[in-house]
Amino acid sequence: MENMYVFFSRLIGTLAVILLISAFIGSTQLLKKLIEARKTWKFVLIVGLAGGLFGIYGNISGFDLNSAVISVRDIGPMMSGLMGGPVSGLLAGAIAGFQRLSMGGITAQACVVATCIIGLICGIISVSVPDILKRSGWVLLIGAVMESLHLGIVLLMVTPFSTAWGIVRQIAIPFVTVNAAGIALMTVIMHFFDNQRQLTLERERMKSELEVANVIQNSLLPALSDRYPGRPELKVSASMEAAKTVGGDFYDVFFIDDDQIVFLIGDVSGKGVPAALFMACSKVILQNCVRITPDLAEGVALANDVLCRGNDAEMFVTVWAGVLNIRNGELIYVSAGHNPPVLVRDGVPEFMKAKSGFVLGGMENMAYSETGLRLKDGDKIFLYTDGVTEAVTKDNESFGNDRLLECLKDCAEESPGKTIEKVKSSLNGFVRDNEQFDDITMLCFEWHRQA
C-alpha cells in the first residue's frame, strides 16, 4: 500500500508538469493556430510531434520498477490521436515508443507496441466520433481502457509472466487512474481555452457590430450646423451620449413647412440594442405622424397608437414635441411623460409648465393636450433627458433640477452650443469618475426676432 502512494505521487508530479505546459499552450495563440489549421497535413504533423514530445518527457520523468519504466507517456499519443486522427496518434506513439526502447528494460518492446497501438486506436475513435474531445467523461473511460490495454500487452509480451504480473499488480491502479485522469484533464483544458477563444471572437464580432450600430444610430440624428436649420432667427445645438455603445435617447429637428420647425426629444425605456431599435422606430413614427397631422396633439396621439400595436416587448418612450413658428416665435408643445424643458428668459432659467400626458407605447387611445408659449427675442429653450438630472456620484447623490437651473443661469448669455458644453462640463465635474448609467441627451435652441 505504501508503494502505491509513492507511485501515485510520482506519476501525479509528472502529470502536473504536462498539464501546466498544456495550459500554457492553450492560453497562447499556438492552440488557436493549430485549431485553424485542422485537417491539414501540417496540423497532423505538429500534433503528432507534440504528442511524441509529451511522451518523451513522460519517459524521462518516469521511475524504474524491476527494470520497467513506469510513466505517463501514453497521454501524449492519446491526445494526438484524439485531436489529430490515426496518423497523428501513430506518429506520437512511435516517437514516444522508440525513445522508450532506447532506455531499455524488460518492458521496452511491449511499451513500443502498446504506445503505437494506443495512439492509432485513439485516432480511429476521433474519426468515428469527431467531437469526442468535448466529452470528458468518455475520454476518461477511453483513457482507462487504453491503459488497461497497455498493461494487457505487457502481460502478453514480457517474460517470465511472473515478473510481468508482479509489475502490473503493483502499478495497475495508479497507472490506469493517473493516465486516464490526465488525458481527461487535458481535454478539459483544451476545451476550456477553445471556448474562451470562441467567446473572444464572439465578443469582438458583437463589439464590431455595435460600433456599426452606433454609426447608424448617429446617422439617424439630424446634423445641426450653421447650414441647418439655416435660418437667421434660430441657433440650434444638440448632443447625445449613450451609456452603452448604442442607446435609447434621441432628438430630432425638422421643418413641416417654410416657417414651422419641429423639435423632438425622447427617452426610450431600457438601454442597449433593444432600446436603440425602439428608438429608431419611435423617431421615424413620430416624425411621420407629426408631418401628416395638422394638430400636434393629434399627431402625438397617432404616434402613440402606432407604437402600441405589436409592442410585444412592452417598451415605451417619453417624448417632448414642440412646433415653433420661426417668424413670430409662437411655440406649441406637447409632453408625453417627459422631463419639463427649461426656458431661459432675461438670464433667468425656469421649468416650462405643461400638462404631461402618458408615455408613448404604453396604452392606446390616449389623449394629449397642447400648451402655447410666445417666445421673446433671445429666449433660449433647453431640452434634456433624465440622464442629465439623474446622473449620480459614487455616493449616490443626484445632479438634480436645482443644479441644472444653476448651471443654466451661469451660462444664460452663452450660445446653445456653449450651453450644452457647459452643462456637460458641470455634469462631469459633479459625477467625476463614476460610471455613466443612463443615456444623456440635450437639445438647445435660441430664437431671435428679425426685423
Image (tube, grey):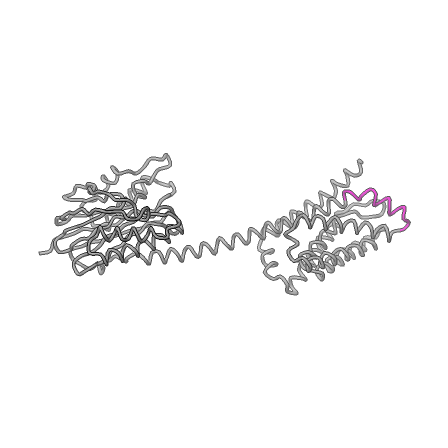
Instruction: Residue 32: tell me if it is visible.
Output: yes
Residue located 8% across and 56% down the image: 451
**Residue 153 percent coordinates (x, y):** 83, 52
Residue located 25% across and 51% down the image: 300
**Residue 151 percent coordinates (x, y):** 81, 49
Question: Is 170 within the magenta?
Answer: yes
Q: Which residues are magenta?
A: 159-174
Q: Quadrant of residue 9?
A: top right
* Residue 30 horizontal side relative to residue 250, left or right: right
* Residue 74 horizontal side relative to residue 237, left or right: right
Total marks in image? 0
User: Which residue is at the front of the view, 251 or 294?
Assistant: 294
Image quadrant containing the N terminus: top right
* Residue 448 horizontal side relative to residue 388, left or right: left
Instruction: Residue 59: tell me if it is visible.
Output: no
User: Which residue is at the front of the view, 39 or 362?
Assistant: 362
Residue located 65% across and 58% down the image: 130
Q: Quick one: which residue is furthest to the bottom in this view?
A: 41
**Residue 254 percent coordinates (x, y):** 23, 57
Q: Main secondary structure of the magenta part?
A: helix
Question: Is 443 within the magenta?
Answer: no
**Residue 47 percent coordinates (x, y):** 67, 58
Q: Quadrant of residue 348?
A: top left
Q: Quick one: which residue is furthest to the front in this view?
A: 365
User: Which residue is at the front of the view, 339 or 419?
Assistant: 339
